[in-house]
Image (tube, rainbow, N blue to C red):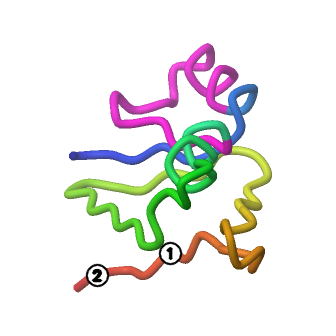
C-alpha cells in the first residue's frame, strides 16, 4: 500500500473533510479489534508497510488484550530504511 492513515474514525473523517487525508488504508481501533480481538485468538503479529507515508490523525492509543493470555498487545511503529 502507498499510504496508511492511523487514527480514530472521527479524526480520519475530519481529515478527509479538510482535504488532508490521503487515499491510503484507514487503520482504526475497530479495524484492529477485528484483526486482533477475535474469540479464536486472532493474529499475534501484524505488520504493515507503506511506500509513501504513515499518517497519524488525532489521539492514537491502540491497545488490545490478547486472548487467551489476557496480556496487553500494543501497536508498535518501526520505521524502515
List the residue tagged with mark 2: 80
Badge count: 2
As for residue 59 lying within the magenta part, the answer is no
Q: Which residue is drawn at 33% across and 61% down?
A: 48
Q: Which residue is farthest bottom?
A: 81
Q: Which of 10 and 76 is in front in this view?
A: 76
**58 vs 35, nearest the viewer:** 35
Disc 1 to disc 2: CB gap under 8 Å: no
Helix, strand or loop under label 2: loop
At a point 62% along the width and 49% down the height, the residue shown is 39
Left or right: 4 as drawn, with respect to 17: left
Q: Give the range drawn in magenta.
A: 12-29
Residue that mark 1 sits on? 77
36 left or right of 60 in image: left
Q: How crowded is mark 2: few (under 14 residues within 10 Å), some or many (20 or more)?
A: few
Tell me which residue sits at (69%, 22%) in the image.
14
Amino acid at each position: 500500500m502507498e499510504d496508511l492513515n492511523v487514527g480514530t474514525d472521527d479524526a480520519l473523517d475530519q481529515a478527509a473533510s479538510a482535504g488532508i487525508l490521503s487515499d491510503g488504508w484507514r487503520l482504526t481501533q475497530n479495524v484492529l479489534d477485528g484483526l486482533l480481538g477475535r474469540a479464536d485468538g486472532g493474529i499475534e503479529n501484524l505488520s504493515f508497510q507503506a511506500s509513501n507515508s504513515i499518517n497519524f490523525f488525532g489521539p492514537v492509543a491502540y491497545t488490545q488484550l490478547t486472548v487467551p493470555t489476557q496480556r496487553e498487545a500494543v501497536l508498535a511503529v518501526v520505521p524502515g530504511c
